[in-house]
Image (spheres, rainbow, N blue to C red):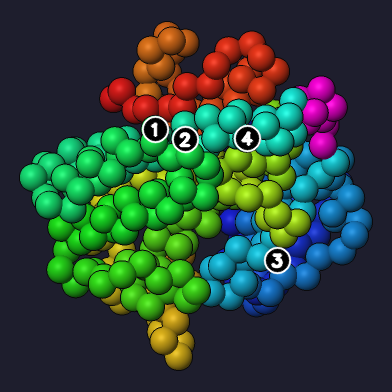
């Protein structure tokens, strides 16, 4: 079974035959058979060469890079194996047609807000004033005339949502507002790190499909990011990332001692990142009985299913209905 591998220490990565070796600065080597490798995540300073990247390209392994603080910096993505000109053309048509683009953008936001409300419901927090405000704003999604209006509405809903999270976490992790660049407190650091991991997870699953990750609908396409990954991540952040983070802090798996502060920027320590990612990787493998497929699927596979649904929509097969968790 292929899996994600994470390297946190500085060192080098090299290949020998069909095995990848992760070598830390102190000389310790960790062998990883390439057949078991799906994504390689490199934190810190890592040396590698073009021969290694060529091999990763041959084996269709994605390599994701993060800086010392755990912020995502980029990915090495092998040449697309499932490329489809027809799908790319249809994706572009849906973007260029304002009505079609707005339909998909609204679908992503509806799913995101549904899961924000669901998170509060599962925590018995539905009587909160901010949750009631979210519900009222949710009803206005259909009234948005363009993507800009929709983004403004989504931003207001998200502000209320972040306030609701404070009502469901331990007092020592309370935060006053969402701060991203940089995170100013431990809970913001967790949100940013969790969102980063979800972005790379969505990118990894999208790579296995015919979707072009640069053609998006809610977020404006950009030269510097895979904006369709941001679109789909909107669905899974309140469904997966935020409840996962709350569970980490409320069960003391992540504590204040697992954070560091550098000139007002708060980030997870090395130990904190290891604890987070170990739990995150295991959580992605949790399975749910799919009511249409009639079999169990993992959270990770749910992301890929969402990509397949989007493909069916853009080629005119089946209208896109975004995921709304039933479990």
- The answer to whether residue 162 is visible is yes
Task: Give the Cα separation between the discs numbered 2 and 4.
Answer: 12 Å
Considering depth in this image, is 25 or 141 the residue closer to the camera? 141
**In front: label 2 or label 3:** 2
Asked whether, in this view, residue 2 is left or right of residue 128, the answer is right
Secondary structure of the residue carrying numbered label 2 = helix
Task: Give the Cα separation between the discs numbered 3 and 4.
Answer: 51 Å
Secondary structure of the residue carrying numbered label 4 = helix
Residue at screen point 84% across, 54% down: 53
Task: Give the Cα separation between the discs numbered 4 and 1.
Answer: 15 Å
Q: Residues within 10 Å of mark 3 (few under 14, many from 20)?
A: many
Instruction: Please report whichever mark, 2 or 3, sits nearer to the chain's N-terminal start.
Output: 3
**In front: label 3 or label 4:** 4
- Can you give x and y, in whole percent of width and height, for residue 193 in the image? 47, 61
Q: Residue 98 bears which disc, if any?
A: 4
Whether 213 is among the magenta residues is no
Task: Give the Cα separation between the discs numbered 3 and 1.
Answer: 53 Å
Residue at screen point 22% across, 41% down: 136
Instruction: Please report whichever mark, 3 or 1, sits nearer to the chain's N-terminal start.
Output: 3
Residue 189 occupies quadrant: bottom left
Q: Residues within 10 Å of mark 4 (few under 14, many from 20)?
A: some
Instruction: Please report whichever mark, 3 or 4, sits nearer to the chain's N-terminal start.
Output: 3
Residue at which label 2 appears: 106
Instruction: Please report whichever mark, 4 or 1, sits nearer to the chain's N-terminal start.
Output: 4
Task: Give the Cα separation between the discs numbered 2 and 3.
Answer: 46 Å
Residue at which label 3 appears: 23
Residue 82 occupies quadrant: top right
Q: Are marks 2 and 4 in contact (CB under 8 Å)?
A: no
């Amino acid at each position: 079974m292929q899996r994600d591998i994470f390297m946190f220490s500085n060192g080098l990565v090299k290949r020998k035959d069909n095995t990848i070796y992760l070598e830390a600065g102190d000389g310790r080597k960790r062998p990883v058979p390439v057949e078991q490798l799906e994504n390689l995540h490199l934190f810190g300073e890592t040396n590698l060469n073009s021969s290694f990247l060529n091999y990763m390209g041959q084996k269709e392994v994605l390599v994701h890079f993060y800086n010392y603080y755990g912020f995502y910096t980029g990915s090495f993505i092998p040449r697309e194996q499932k490329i489809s000109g027809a799908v790319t053309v249809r994706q572009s048509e849906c973007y260029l047609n304002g009505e079609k683009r707005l339909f998909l953008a609204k679908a992503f936001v509806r799913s995101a807000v549904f899961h924000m409300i669901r998170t509060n419901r599962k925590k018995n927090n539905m009587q909160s004033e901010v949750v009631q405000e979210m519900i009222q704003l949710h009803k206005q999604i259909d009234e948005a005339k363009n993507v800009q209006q929709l983004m403004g509405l989504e931003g207001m809903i998200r502000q209320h949502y972040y306030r609701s999270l404070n009502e469901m976490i331990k007092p020592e992790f309370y935060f006053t507002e969402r701060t991203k660049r940089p995170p100013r407190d431990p809970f913001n650091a967790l949100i940013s790190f969790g969102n980063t991991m979800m972005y790379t997870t969505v990118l990894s699953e999208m790579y296995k499909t015919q979707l072009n990750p640069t053609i998006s609908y809610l977020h404006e396409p950009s030269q510097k990011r895979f904006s369709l990954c941001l679109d789909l991540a909107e669905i899974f952040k309140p469904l997966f990332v935020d409840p996962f983070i709350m569970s980490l802090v409320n069960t003391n798996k992540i504590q204040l001692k697992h954070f560091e502060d550098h000139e007002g920027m708060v980030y997870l320590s090395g130990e904190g990142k290891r604890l987070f990612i170990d739990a995150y990787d295991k959580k992605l493998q949790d399975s749910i009985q799919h009511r249409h497929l009639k079999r169990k699927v993992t959270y990770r596979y749910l992301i890929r299913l969402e990509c397949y649904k989007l493909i069916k929509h853009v080629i005119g097969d089946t209208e896109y209905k975004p995921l709304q968790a039933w479990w």
